[in-house]
Amino acid sequence: MTTPVRVAVTGAAGAICYSMLFRIAAGEMLGKDTPIILQLIEIPQAMQALSGVVMELDDCAFPLLHGVEITDDANKGFKDANVAILVGGRPRGPGMLRSDLIQANGPIFTTQGKAINDNAADDIRVVVVGNPCNTNALIAMHNAPDVPRERFTAMTRLDENRAKTQLARKAGVLVSEVTNVGIWGNHSNTMFPSFEQIKIGGKAATDVITDREWLEGEFMKTVQLRGKAIIDARGASSAASAGNAAIDHIRDWSRPTPAGDWISMAVPSQGQYGIEEGLMYSFPVRCDGKGGYEIVEGLDLSDYAMEKIRATETELKEERDVVKDLLK
Ligand code: NAX
């Protein structure tokens, strides 16, 4: 029997996790032959609610779920973890600026970064979902000096999936026909879904959808503002689709990326495309199936794309400056 993979998840009593945990336990993230142990981390006030989630996990009798541990102590929660999904954080309250949210959430990620550094397994891989996810991942990475930097990532997969569906709809094809979707930069309104490299049925998306005005206008706006549209419609932020994207992120990081394609992950920049080294920036990446990945280099980017790519970099630098005291 394969040794179970330990998956640590924060914010486990929250909305995203309520859909995500059950799918992880069913084998949709690491495969139908990989047993897992869930290590669920919450704050003390949410432990009772979390115990209810665990009862429901128990009641599903998932064959692959070899154990569930719950704790409000990050050191215990990340003990021997192979995968960490950091969802938990404070939501943005009424009247709160983005910079207030960054400051409120920052300390959570220093604590969790240290706890990962001191307790996780040697092969730990981390994805941060809790917003502002790029900057939170940057903080966690800086507070985990013994963990290789490339193991820290932030999630832009929801933006990628959103872009895919919008393009498929417009072109009248199935989403599986849409490939090479790269999200650049920050998971925020400045994020750039670079349609110039996207392919639809193997052809350039710009040849299939010749309405450039739609690509630069409605398409970009729909993807960038989708989170708000969902809050307006549902009265609550994206939860099931965010959980699905986190599963996609870890699943696709764990297997080789199909030839010729790529996926989007926010990862520490090594200076590609002139993006400042060390920034947690979303790029198109290709995974090797052994836990490694490389940023796709050499893409031909127009002046229009470069301007967008720089604008989202500027925002990430500003966010980093707000939390500079938390970075080591
Ligand atoms: P909820 O408010 O339902 O759940 C958050 C949970 O985190 C709560 O149960 C809370 O008790 C817990 N928590 C708070 N501080 C914690 C800590 N220090 N350790 C462990 N747990 C802690 O929010 P939910 O809808 O689940 O969203 C979670 C986060 O995902 C938010 O920050 C949200 O902004 C972010 N999102 C990120 C997305 C992305 O694409 N990257 C999209 C969806 C979502 O907006």
Image (cartoon, rainbow, N blue to C red):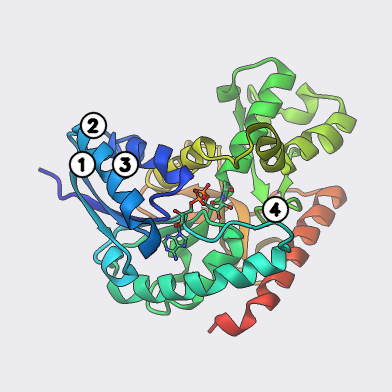
Q: Earlier in the sequence, mark 4 or mark 3?
A: 3
Q: Which mark is residue 251?
A: none
Drawn side of residue 225 relative to residue 272, left or right: right
Spatial CA distance of label 4 from label 3 is 28 Å
Q: Amino acid at mark 2?
A: Cys
Spatial CA distance of label 1 from label 2 is 10 Å
Judge depth for marks 4 and 2 and give the one in front. 2
Give how far across and how far down residue 28 sits, in percent.
Answer: 34, 35
Q: Earlier in the sequence, mark 1 or mark 4?
A: 1
Judge depth for marks 4 and 3 and give the one in front. 4
Badge 3: few (under 14), some or many (20 or more) residues near its Cα, within 10 Å?
A: many
Judge depth for marks 1 and 3 and give the one in front. 1
The reply to whether the C-beta atoms of the residues labelled 1 and 2 are less than 8 Å apart is yes
Residue 162 visible: yes
Quadrant position of residue 134? bottom right
Q: Amino acid at mark 1?
A: Leu
Spatial CA distance of label 1 from label 4 is 34 Å
Give the SS element for disc 1: strand
Q: Which mark is residue 188?
A: 4
Drawn side of residue 189 relative to residue 252, left or right: right
Mark 1 CB near ligand 1 (8 Å cut): no
Q: Earlier in the sequence, mark 1 or mark 3?
A: 3
Q: Which mark is residue 30?
A: 3
Spatial CA distance of label 2 from label 3 is 18 Å
| Residue annotated with mark 2 | 60
Give how far across and how far down residue 57 sits, in percent.
Answer: 26, 39
| Residue annotated with mark 1 | 65
The reply to whether the C-beta atoms of the residues labelled 4 and 3 are less than 8 Å apart is no
Give the SS element for disc 4: loop
Q: Earlier in the sequence, mark 4 or mark 2?
A: 2
